[in-house]
Image (cartoon, rainbow, N blue to C red):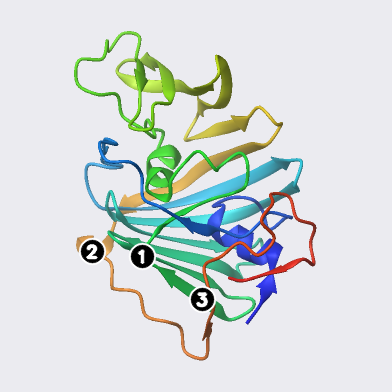
């Protein structure tokens, strides 16, 4: 079973506006020792409006994030008319991606990593933290809180600027140059990549998650199962290329 790349890609790249982004693919989990950072102090439900601009095109989505725990969350995306486009269900050890337009879904026990160049450095578990304006990778104990500069479990360098103990900006470095950087905005943020890609989002609603928990994923009635693979193998595939879910 096949699905169009731009639909599938929107399912993994949380905010690409249903443009020409590639599909997600499973990758090995992060190296041992990668620190964890709670995305929120309590279970929350948040609505975001997201805009994307870059080499792959431009567009917008409405995102609903339901966060029960740092590794237990769901994201649902809809278009400007309120029609469901894709949804993601993430739990420890498993992730499920649903393409509502093609009525397909996939499930994997590996971490999904977005091949879209602006999002590829971030594992799925970092997305709630980034949306909420927190550091995607927390500094280890002993890091100077005034000028955070640290290495993650993969040896990558991160820096951050804090204002009143809250992140105002952060940067991921590669070979001495910025690769990915974020800047806080009122109720949102701007995530930029050195290739010119940029994601902007703004929180519209933030409220406690009803019941404080999420129901386990079940395939929607009438949907067929596909594979969580990237059939094109390259970012920026044009609309119409076909890949697995």
Regarding mark 1 in the picture, which secondary structure is present there?
loop
Residue 1: give x, y in percent of width and height.
Answer: 62, 82
Which mark's residue is nearer the viewer, 3 or 1? Answer: 1
**Residue at (54% x, 78% y) in the render:** 226
Q: Number of callouts in the render?
A: 3
Q: Residues within 10 Å of mark 2 (few under 14, many from 20)?
A: some
Residue 47: give x, y in percent of width and height.
Answer: 46, 52
Considering the image in quadrants, where does the C terminus appear? Answer: bottom right
**Residue at (75% x, 47% y) in the render:** 56
Q: Which mark is residue 162?
A: none
Q: CA distance from mark 2 to mark 3?
A: 22 Å
The residue that label 1 is drawn on is 109
The residue that label 2 is drawn on is 213
**Residue at (69% x, 64% y) in the render:** 5
Q: CA distance from mark 2 to mark 1?
A: 21 Å
**Residue at (26% x, 39% y) in the render:** 36
User: Would you say 78 lies left or right of 53 here?
Assistant: left
Labels 2 and 3: the sequence-earlier one? 3
């Amino acid at each position: 079973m096949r699905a169009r790349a731009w639909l599938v890609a929107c399912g993994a790249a949380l905010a690409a506006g249903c443009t020409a982004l590639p599909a997600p693919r499973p990758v090995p989990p992060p190296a041992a020792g990668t620190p964890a950072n709670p995305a929120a102090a309590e279970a929350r439900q948040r609505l975001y409006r997201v805009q994307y601009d870059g080499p792959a095109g431009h567009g917008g989505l409405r995102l609903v994030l339901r966060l029960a725990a740092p590794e237990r969350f769901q994201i649902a995306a809809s278009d400007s008319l309120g029609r469901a486009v894709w949804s993601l269900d993430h739990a420890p050890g498993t992730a499920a991606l649903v393409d509502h337009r093609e009525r397909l879904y996939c499930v994997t026990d590996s971490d999904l990593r977005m091949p879209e160049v602006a999002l590829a450095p971030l594992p799925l578990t970092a997305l709630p933290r980034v949306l909420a304006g927190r550091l995607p990778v927390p500094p280890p104990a002993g890091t100077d809180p005034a000028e955070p500069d640290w290495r993650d479990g993969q040896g990558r360098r991160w820096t951050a600027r804090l204002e009143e103990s809250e992140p105002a900006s952060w940067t991921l470095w590669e070979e001495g140059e910025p690769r990915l950087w974020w800047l806080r905005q009122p109720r949102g943020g701007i995530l930029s990549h050195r290739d010119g890609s940029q994601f902007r989002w703004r929180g519209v609603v933030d409220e406690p998650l009803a019941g404080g928990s999420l129901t386990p994923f079940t395939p929607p009635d009438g949907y067929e199962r596909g594979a969580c693979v990237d059939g094109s193998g390259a970012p920026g595939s044009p609309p119409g290329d076909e890949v697995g879910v």
